[in-house]
Image: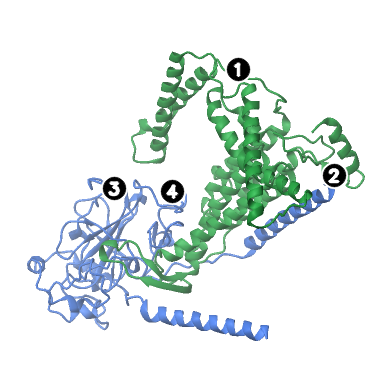
Chain colours: A green, B blue
């Protein structure tokens, strides 16, 4: 936590490990959370473009590397493997659904196995349940699932790498009330885990029973109490810095803010619908989107005008932040630019079975996003602190 | 001990797999459909398949297939090939190609539609039917894999957008411009007629099983149904001679004048499938090596971090 503690750890670690581990003797510090979020969201956008299993596995590898190299020791930074489990579940569900709700096999398909077929009545003829399952169907379902899994892992990487409580600071002032609730909510799970560990350790020290149903009662009550207390402490700390405070806003200005935000959100929804539905009239697309954004910004400005808050330990935005966010954005732009490769290579088909291609530019783009593992400053070596 | 048990498990699995394969072969055998030259389709036998490439400056191709068949099989024989979407599989027709048109290139091209998700309602292949004697297009209520065309009917695939009211995106040609008008199969006298089952009937009996009754029986069994005013209507129509059928007799593509619309109707002769290249394994190996290298680096970093802690 303190500078003294850091330097002592550093000093003890340096003789055992060469300095390359420190990322070229750079000072360890925490990257701005928004930089990680921009990087991860850009990579997720890039992933949404491709269905190529080779590129998707490459994205997973890059995410794994960056998370391993640059995560801190905070409680939320240990969760990446759970996102991987979730990703595996997504792929499995996609394959099972494709096999059960058969989408039809062609005579050219490679037959794998057959599920019992449940006949459906004529008026339900569009849906088949069970039947033969082909290799092509399994492969394309797995790739389809893998794409969603990769996007999930991108979000997981952002959650792992960025400090959620620090990310809250970037929220516009008008959203603080929402932000406080979100922060308290997302910090509950890691705090519960920590509380369980602490209570279990304390019981062990007192030679109490740590197993069985009786021990459970002795654990649950202190854990709940502990978690609740910490959440309240966090809320109090945030309140003391001006978060979630109504400020000196009058009733009229609050109403105006609400109306502006509501109209703006409606505009954003209409704009999104107009952009996504190709048959919608054109004025519903970009104009509605722009109007909605303008209204929202005005509402946030008006709402945030009277709220003041103080910052303890501000997060700087320096060159590494630009580099990390930029590497993600450039990779997304490259995958959407169609420059130097055939767009068909991004979405290979398995009907008929074909080896997927590995287009050069998208591969380079994903590897470029992986350079965030070097561009970001190394995290503080050992920091078992659990304070925000 | 363990090895023998393992062996038993493997053998059992193999037997099960073989049995399921055999079961599939026995039950799900596809209807024996075959591509035919256009002249083999008559007013009562065979199905005319028409695909409208006018969105890409091409003609309307029409070809002939035997019944019983499904809309999907009709569209995947004699040089025709389709591609499904990544999300829904081959059953959703996303691209159509014919080996006689631009070397079998499938449309829409990957640049126009990536065929990963369901195409938008403003640009997709819509599927239309016209029953024998019917001069109006019906939007297909079933997918290509479930629909079984009647003998003497016309299937049309046209690219574009449709709306719910059914006012937009209707085909620009009429079924009469596409259907076969000859009452007897023409050309290739040595071969049996295109639909051997249907040909046993007197020419003016409407034999088509309704698409809703999804039976695998040959259409002959459905013949005695004392139904509908349709047979009389189609019988009425049939004798009217039309000048076009002669064009269909030749096997090579030949233009048929399409009176009302600007697009040409061209007969597509059964052709060999476009050559398929299954690609090379080198990109896969390269990609796997890259993934392994990055994964190895991650493992190395993880070990090093654990040691310094």
Residue B62: % across, % down: 28, 63
CA neighbours of label 2 inside 10 A, class few (<14), some (14 to 19), many (20+): few
Q: Is residue A252 left or right of residue B180?
A: right
Residue B169: % across, % down: 27, 48
Comparing B40 with A127, the one in front is A127
Disc 2 designates what residue?
A20
Kindly report which numbered mark, 3 or 2, lies closer to the viewer in this rendering.
2
Disc 4 designates what residue?
B112
> Element type at marker 2?
helix
Q: Which mark is residue A308?
A: 1
Q: CA distance from mark 2 to mark 4?
A: 48 Å
Residue at horizontal 86 percent and vertical 39 percent from the top: A9
Q: Would you say the residues marked 4 and 3 are in contact, meaning their CB atoms lie under 8 Å apart?
A: no
Residue A22: % across, % down: 82, 41
Comparing B273 with A212, the one in front is A212
Kindly report which numbered mark, 4 or 3, lies closer to the viewer in this rendering.
3
> Element type at marker 1?
loop
Name the chain letter of the residue that bears numbered label 2. Answer: A
Residue at horizontal 17 percent and vertical 72 percent from the top: B44
């Amino acid at each position: 936590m303190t500078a003294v503690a850091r330097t002592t750890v550093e000093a003890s670690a340096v003789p055992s490990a060469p300095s390359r581990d420190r990322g070229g003797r750079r000072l360890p510090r925490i990257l701005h959370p928004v930089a990680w979020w921009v990087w991860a969201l850009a990579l997720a956008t890039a992933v949404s473009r491709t269905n190529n299993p080779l590129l998707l596995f490459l994205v997973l590898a890059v995410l794994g590397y960056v998370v391993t190299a640059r995560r801190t020791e905070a409680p939320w930074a240990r969760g990446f493997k759970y996102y991987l489990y979730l990703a595996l579940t997504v792929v499995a569900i996609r394959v099972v659904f494709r096999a059960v709700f058969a989408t039809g096999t062609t005579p050219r398909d490679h037959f794998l196995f057959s599920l019992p077929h449940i006949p459906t009545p004529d008026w339900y003829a569009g849906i088949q349940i069970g039947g033969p399952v082909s290799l092509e169907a399994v492969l394309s379902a797995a790739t389809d699932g893998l794409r969603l899994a990769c996007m999930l892992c991108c979000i997981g990487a952002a959650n792992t790498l960025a400090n959620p409580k620090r990310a809250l600071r970037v929220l516009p002032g008008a959203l603080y009330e929402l932000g406080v609730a979100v922060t308290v909510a997302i910090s509950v799970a890691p705090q519960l885990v920590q509380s369980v560990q602490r209570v279990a350790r304390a019981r062990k020290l007192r030679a109490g029973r740590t197993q069985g149903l009786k021990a459970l009662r002795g654990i649950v009550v202190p854990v709940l109490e502990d978690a609740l207390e910490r959440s309240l402490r966090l809320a109090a700390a945030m309140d003391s810095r001006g978060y979630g405070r109504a400020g000196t806003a009058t009733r009229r200005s609050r109403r105006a803010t609400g109306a502006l935000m509501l109209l703006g959100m409606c505009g954003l929804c209409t704009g999104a619908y107009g952009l996504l539905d190709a048959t919608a009239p054109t004025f519903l697309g970009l104009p509605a989107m722009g109007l909605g954004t303008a209204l929202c910004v005005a509402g946030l400005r008006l709402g945030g005008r009277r709220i003041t808050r103080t910052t303890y330990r501000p997060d700087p935005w320096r060159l590494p932040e630009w580099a990390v966010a930029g590497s993600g954005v450039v990779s997304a732009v490259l995958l959407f630019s169609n420059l130097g490769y055939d767009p068909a290579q991004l979405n290979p088909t398995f009907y008929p079975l074909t080896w997927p291609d590995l287009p050069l530019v998208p591969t380079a783009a994903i590897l470029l996003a992986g350079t965030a593992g070097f561009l970001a400053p190394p995290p503080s070596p050992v920091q078992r602190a659990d304070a925000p | 001990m363990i090895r023998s048990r393992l062996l038993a498990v493997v053998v059992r699995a193999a037997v099960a797999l073989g049995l399921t394969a055999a079961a599939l072969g026995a039950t799900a055998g596809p209807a024996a459909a075959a591509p035919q030259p256009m002249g083999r389709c008559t007013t009562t036998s065979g199905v005319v398949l028409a695909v409208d490439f006018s969105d890409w400056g091409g003609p309307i191709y029409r070809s002939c297939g035997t019944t019983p068949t499904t809309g999907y099989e009709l569209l995947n024989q004699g040089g025709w090939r389709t591609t499904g979407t990544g999300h829904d599989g081959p059953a959703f027709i996303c691209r159509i190609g014919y080996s006689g048109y631009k070397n079998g290139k499938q449309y829409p091209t990957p640049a126009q539609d990536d065929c990963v998700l369901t195409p938008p309602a403003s640009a997709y292949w819509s599927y239309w039917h016209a029953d024998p004697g019917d001069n109006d297009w019906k939007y297909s209520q079933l997918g290509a894999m479930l629909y079984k065309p009647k003998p003497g009917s016309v299937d049309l695939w046209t690219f574009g957008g449709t709306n719910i009211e059914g006012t937009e995106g209707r085909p620009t040609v009429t079924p009469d411009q596409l259907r076969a008008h000859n009452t007897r199969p023409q050309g290739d006298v040595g071969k049996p007629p295109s639909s051997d089952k249907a040909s046993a009937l007197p020419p003016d009996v409407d034999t088509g099983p309704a698409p809703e009754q999804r039976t695998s029986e040959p259409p002959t069994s459905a013949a005695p149904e004392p139904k509908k005013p349709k047979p009389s209507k189609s019988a009425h129509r049939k004798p009217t001679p039309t000048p076009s059928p002669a064009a269909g007799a030749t096997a090579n593509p030949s233009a048929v004048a399409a009176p009302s619309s600007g697009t040409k109707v061209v007969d597509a002769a059964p052709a060999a499938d476009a050559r398929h290249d299954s690609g090379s394994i080198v990109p896969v190996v390269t990609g796997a090596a890259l993934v392994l290298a990055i994964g190895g680096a991650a493992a190395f970093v993880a070990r090093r971090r654990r040691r310094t802690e």
